[in-house]
Image (cartoon, rainbow, N blue to C red):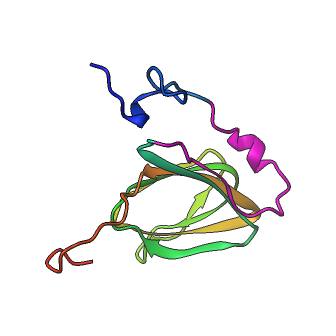
Amino acid sequence: MASSAAHDTGPDGAGPPEPRLLCDARALAGDPPAAAGVLWKLAESGRQLDANLVRLAPGAQVAPHAEPDLDVLVYVVSGGGTLGAGPRDEPRELTEGATVWLPHGSTRSLGAGPDGLVYLTVHRRRPGMRIRSRKEGP
């Protein structure tokens, strides 16, 4: 059965979507370390996932926080640091190649080591804003 939805077709609007190379995370991670922040993000139309390649400068921190709705997968591309996994857990060392699952509802923090930390996050795409009734809550 053919579909005319934009996410069901290739970039030219004809035929099924095709896999394609989006970025070289190791090459982006190797750029001058002075550039911190988001190095790349998934922006393809019709996607079901979100992904970001992020660089933390040496010693930088992502403060403890909880993601109530989404599981997040973190892959360490280069550098190292620590994962804080909640008030009861000791920080865990992160090294190049580490893959971490952050279940929804969990508290987590990240800290970059002396060489900084470059990591890829992948999670289900967050639904758009919607109006809720008072009964549904925030």
> Would residue 74 be found to the left or right of residue 123 on screen?
right
Relative to 52, say whether 46 is above or below.
above
The number of callouts visible is 0
- Residue 111's x, y, as percent? 63, 69
> Would residue 31 be found to the left or right of residue 110 on screen?
right
Residue displayed at 45% across by 46% down: 49
Residue displayed at 41% across by 44% down: 48
> Would residue 30 be found to the left or right of residue 95 on screen?
right
Residue displayed at 76% across by 68% down: 58
Image quadrant where residue 80 sits: bottom right
The secondary structure that dominates the magenta segment is: loop
User: Is 39 one of the magenta-colored residues?
Assistant: yes
- Residue 19's x, y, as percent? 53, 26
Residue furthest left as drawn: 135
Q: Quadrant of the N terminus?
A: top left
Relative to 29, say whether 35 is above or below.
below
User: Is 48 one of the magenta-colored residues?
Assistant: no
Viewer-nearest residue: 63 or 126: 126
Relative to 85, say whether 25 is above or below.
above
Image quadrant where residue 35 sits: bottom right
Which residues, given as a range, are shown in magenta? 21-45
Viewer-nearest residue: 22 or 72: 22
- Residue 123's x, y, as percent? 44, 51
Residue displayed at 59% across by 28% down: 20
Viewer-nearest residue: 131 or 30: 131
Q: Quadrant of the C terminus?
A: bottom left
- Residue 135's x, y, as percent? 13, 78
